[in-house]
Image (tube, rainbow, N blue to C red):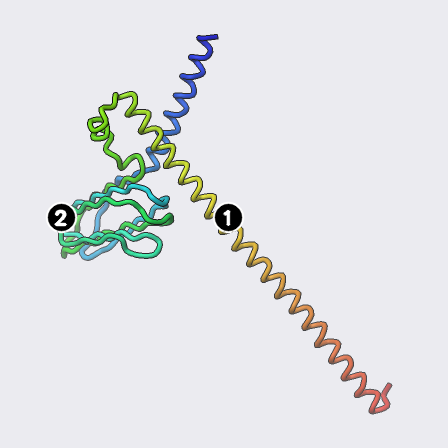
Amino acid sequence: WGHTAAMGSRSAFLLLLLAAAAVQHASSIEVSFDLNASQKKCFGEELSKHSLLVSEFSAEGPISVTVADPTATIFSDKDKNQIKTAFTTNQAGTHMFCVQNLTKKGLNVRMNVAWGAQARDYSQIAKKENLENVVVGLRRVEDMLYTYRNRVINMRSREERMRQTNDSTSFRVIAMSVLSLVLIVGVGATQLYYFRNFFRSKKII
């Protein structure tokens, strides 16, 4: 029994590690791309509310960087070869990361954006709280799963809003169809009444 329980615990732990690895892969963007003279390029990512976000942009010439949430620009900096920022998101939704080349020649830009558990420095947390490596690893897994949970909640919330919008649109279409049918029937009845009286006045019928 003890052996079976141990096997079950190890299996559950492996599943947690696999889930955490999947979340870790989906919690960062690390990309290198080319920008022509004065060219601007943007990347979008769905982030949950109250997510820690750390971003770094670097190039061999001056660049401009802006970060915007669904309603406003929340960070902007320019005329630097390397730009870093870290903050906590105030609302859920698509966050845009835009980089513009400020030179008159082509540049290669390296962008590294991480959020949630990926944005935390667990080595500093371990030193500050005197945590063992195993505890730090579990803390990392817990944070990653929390990030994944928030992502799922946001996806469900968006799906619910879309469903409500579709239901509202369907109701309006049905209401307009019924109103159009009533108008057509009303116009037809009016025309029938008018022509009937007209033909009677002419003694045609």
- Residue 92 vs residue 104, the one in the foreground: 92
Residue at 46% x, 48% y is 158
| 35 over 194 or under it: above or below | above
| 127 over 61 or under it: above or below | above
Residue 121's x, y, as percent? 23, 33
Say whether disc 1 or disc 2 marks the residue closer to the N-terminus.
2
**Which-is-in-front pick, marks 1 and 2?**
1
| 70 over 202 or under it: above or below | above
C-alpha distance separating marks 1 and 2: 43 Å
- Residue 43 vs residue 170, the one in the foreground: 170
Residue 110's x, y, as percent? 21, 43
Label 1: which secondary element: helix
Callout 1: few (<14), some (14-19), or many (20+) C-alpha neighbours within 10 Å?
Answer: few
Callout 2: few (<14), some (14-19), or many (20+) C-alpha neighbours within 10 Å?
Answer: some
| Kind of residue sitting beneath label 1 | Glu
Which residue in the structure is indicated by mark 1? 160
Residue 148's x, y, as percent? 39, 36
Please state, as top left, top right, bottom left or bottom right, where the C terminus lies in the image: bottom right
Which residue in the structure is indicated by mark 2? 81
Q: Is residue 20 left or right of residue 131?
A: right
Residue 35's x, y, as percent? 21, 51
| Kind of residue sitting beneath label 2 | Asn
Residue at 29% x, 20% y is 134
Residue at 44% x, 44% y is 155
